[in-house]
Image: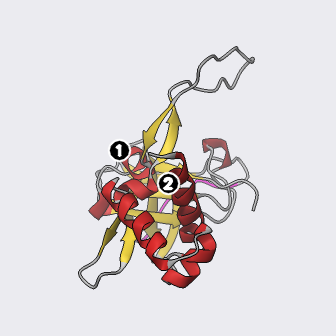
Amino acid sequence: MAIKDSDYLSKLQNYYAKHHGFPSYSRLCNILGLAAKSAVNKVLLRLAEQGYLKRTVDEVWVPAESFFERKLSDTPVVAGLPTFVSDVTADPFMIDQFLVNKPSKTILVPVQGDSMITAGINDGDVVVVEVGSTANTGDIVVAAIDDEFTVKILSKKRGRAILLPANDSYPVIRPEGNLEIIGVVVGLIRKYGK
């Protein structure tokens, strides 16, 4: 990709992240710093050829799958003592490809509360849940107990399902009524800062 096209793509990605759509051609002139709509059209066509954009049947520009690729470093960052890292490269990476195995059965569920903090799930996180997956003892699940939802660790005691918190301040849930496992937590999304 040419350096200038990379810059145009970055501007479009930033705009799309904020507004969830593309503006008119005249507004794109300002955003991309181009004087004419024909110049904008050439940029959009080049980005489409590179797989970042596509047109709908109604001739509306929309992001293609590659538009959402992010760079993944092939060198991990050390969470212990610092080490020297040389020549870090980055390959394209789709977050969905990492977190989602079954798109048609995957939902994102925001978390409220702190009953799962020692499992690394905090208030404000979003859990990636595979709906209808078979849950095993030890899995973190989203469950419904008498139509109230919770995220907990699935366990068994005396042959009965129980739900364990990951915070000693909360009690074990021993469902007396209806317990339905909505799905198994397969990933987590956390945003820092604003």
Residue 71 in sight in this render: yes
- Can you identify the residue that label 2 sits on? 5
Q: Counting residues from the N terminus, which is met first, the one under dot 2 or under dot 1? A: 2
Q: Is residue 104 left or right of residue 12?
A: left
- Can you identify the residue that label 1 sits on? 136
Q: Badge 1, how many Cα within 10 Å: few under 14, some, many 20+? A: few
Residue 99 image point, x, y percent: 42, 48
Point out the image quarter for the C terminus: bottom right
At mark 1, the secondary structure is loop
Q: How much space separates mark 2 and mark 1, taking CA atoms?
A: 48 Å
Q: Nearer the viewer, residue 110 or 158?
A: 110
At mark 2, the secondary structure is helix
Judged by its main secondary structure, the magenta piece is loop
Residue 68 image point, x, y percent: 45, 56
Which residue is rendered at x = 74% and y = 18% of the image?
82
Which residue is rendered at x = 49% and y = 81% of the image?
25
Which label was assigned to residue 124?
none
Which residue is rendered at x = 46% and y = 60% of the image?
142
Q: Nearer the viewer, residue 194 or 176?
A: 194
Highlighted range, magenta: 170-177
Amino acid marked by disc 1: Asn
Q: Nearer the viewer, residue 106 or 20?
A: 20
Q: Badge 2, how many Cα within 10 Å: few under 14, some, many 20+? A: some
